[in-house]
């Protein structure tokens, strides 16, 4: 993700990549983009020629890094999730507000072709009131690990990062909230660890209730022994009072009404599995549009960037799911 955001900055006419710090691959990345390599994150945050920073570090590091950058007067874009607890999200939000700085979250799925079209249809009333949603997110980790990205994937199993759900659910929760302009109000979940040798959650089934009256389900897992079910990597089935939407974020968006099923949008193949294809135009489109939206927010212009409040909402839902499983009861997210 460090290279992804560096590439997005390189491609934008109104952004300039200045420096990189942190991580074992930082020297190679700085050399690739011919920018300064800072010895520490603190020295990077202190540079007077930097207006904004992007954090692409493991989840549990986000809060302290964001607070340090904000203290130096930098706008911050944090890769999802915003943090690992609601309390840390609140600290970050308060620090950004106090300094009148932008704090955004890496919800690049808002900028994918089919997801934007689905949002447009839902908000226009084309499918009526949303009654129910089903989200499927089974991931075969072997495909990514074998794809040539390199790096150390042990942070996936680090208890400080809490579990797979914190990797996957932020995108799903954010898109549902963004589509419907509604909040998750209560959850009931079962979480399990099926993979041998790890101590964090790798599979969760959840029931969700939303403030607009809609109900939903979420299946998230990386405990797959083989490539996932066809077309199910990131799929939404949305039942409205007037029509249905079948949203495959990586293939087709289909609508069904009295005239039957038809394709209304198609996402070109993203090919995010390997390093050789991950930085091609199709995948990078969403990240470039996201960074452009982040810059627009900094400049006070209309923007669809994931806000810190949206980031907090996903973290709150995630923590409620884990709590529900641990306590075997419904958890309310209402104050």
Image (cartoon, rainbow, N blue to C red):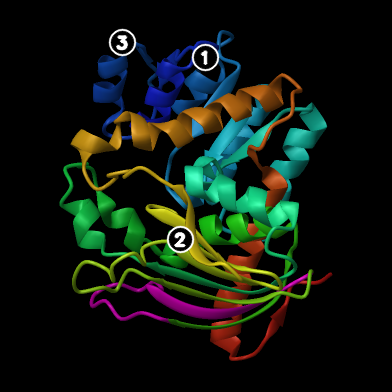
Q: Is residue 195 magenta?
A: yes
Q: Which residue is farthest front?
A: 259
Which region of the structure is painted magenta?
A: 192-211
Tell which residue pokes out farthest to the bottom in this image. 328
Question: Residue at the location (48% across, 80% down)?
Answer: 205
Q: Quadrant of the N terminus?
A: top left
Q: How many marks?
A: 3
Q: Is residue 163 above or below residue 193?
A: above
Q: Please tell me which residue is depicted at 20% across the width and 60% down the height of the picture.
A: 142
Local SS, label 3: loop
As helix, strand or loop, the secondary structure at mark 2 comes to helix
Q: CA distance from mark 2 to mark 1?
A: 29 Å
Report the disc number at residue 34: 3
Tell me which label, 2 or 1, sits earlier in the chain. Answer: 1
> Quick one: label 1, few (<14), some, or many (20+) residues within 10 Å?
some
Looking at the image, is mark 1 or mark 3 earlier in the sequence?
A: 1
Determine contact: label 2, label 1, CB under 8 Å. Answer: no
Q: Which residue is mark 2?
A: 168
Location of the C terminus (image quadrant): bottom right
Residue placed under numbered mark 1 in the picture: 15
- Percent x, y of residue 258: 61, 71
Q: Considering only vertical position in the picture, is 72 above or below 161? A: above
Residue 74 in sight: no
281 lies above or below 113: above
Tell me which label, 3 or 2, sits earlier in the chain.
3
Q: CA distance from mark 1 to mark 3?
A: 15 Å
In percent of the image, x 42 and y 30: which residue is there? 5
Describe residue 78's horizontal placement relative to residue 86 as left or right: left
Q: Is residue 238 magenta?
A: no
């Amino acid at each position: 993700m460090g290279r992804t955001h560096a590439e997005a900055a390189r491609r934008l006419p109104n952004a300039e990549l200045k420096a990189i710090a942190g991580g074992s691959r930082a020297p190679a990345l700085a050399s690739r983009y011919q920018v300064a390599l800072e010895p520490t994150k603190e020295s990077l945050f202190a540079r007077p020629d930097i207006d904004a920073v992007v954090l692409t570090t493991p989840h549990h590091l986000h809060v302290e890094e964001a607070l340090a950058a904000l203290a130096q007067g930098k706008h911050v874009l944090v890769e999802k999730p915003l943090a690992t607890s609601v309390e840390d999200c609140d600290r970050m939000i308060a620090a950004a507000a106090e300094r009148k700085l932008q704090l955004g979250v890496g919800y690049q799925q808002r900028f994918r072709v089919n997801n934007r079209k689905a949002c447009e249809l839902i908000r226009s009333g084309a499918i009526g009131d949303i009654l129910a949603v089903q989200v499927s997110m089974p991931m075969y980790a072997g495909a990514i690990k074998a794809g040539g990205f390199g790096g150390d994937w042990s942070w996936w199993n680090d208890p400080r990062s809490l579990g797979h759900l914190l990797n996957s659910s932020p995108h799903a929760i954010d898109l549902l909230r963004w589509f419907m302009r509604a909040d998750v109000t209560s959850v009931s979940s079962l979480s399990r660890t099926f993979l041998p040798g790890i101590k964090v959650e790798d599979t969760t089934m959840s029931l969700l209730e939303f403030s607009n009256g809609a109900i939903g389900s979420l299946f998230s897992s990386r405990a797959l022994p083989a490539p996932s079910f066809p077309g199910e990597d990131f799929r939404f089935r949305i039942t409205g009072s007037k029509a249905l939407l079948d949203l495959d974020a990586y293939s087709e968006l289909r609508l069904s009404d009295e005239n039957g099923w038809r394709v209304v949008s198609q996402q070109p193949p993203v090919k995010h599995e390997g390093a050789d294809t991950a930085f091609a135009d199709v995948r990078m489109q969403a990240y470039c549009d996201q960074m452009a939206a982040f810059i627009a927010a900094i400049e006070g212009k209309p923007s669809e960037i994931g806000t810190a409040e949206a980031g907090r909402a996903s973290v709150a839902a995630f923590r409620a799911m884990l709590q529900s499983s641990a306590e075997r009861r419904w958890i309310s997210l209402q104050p």
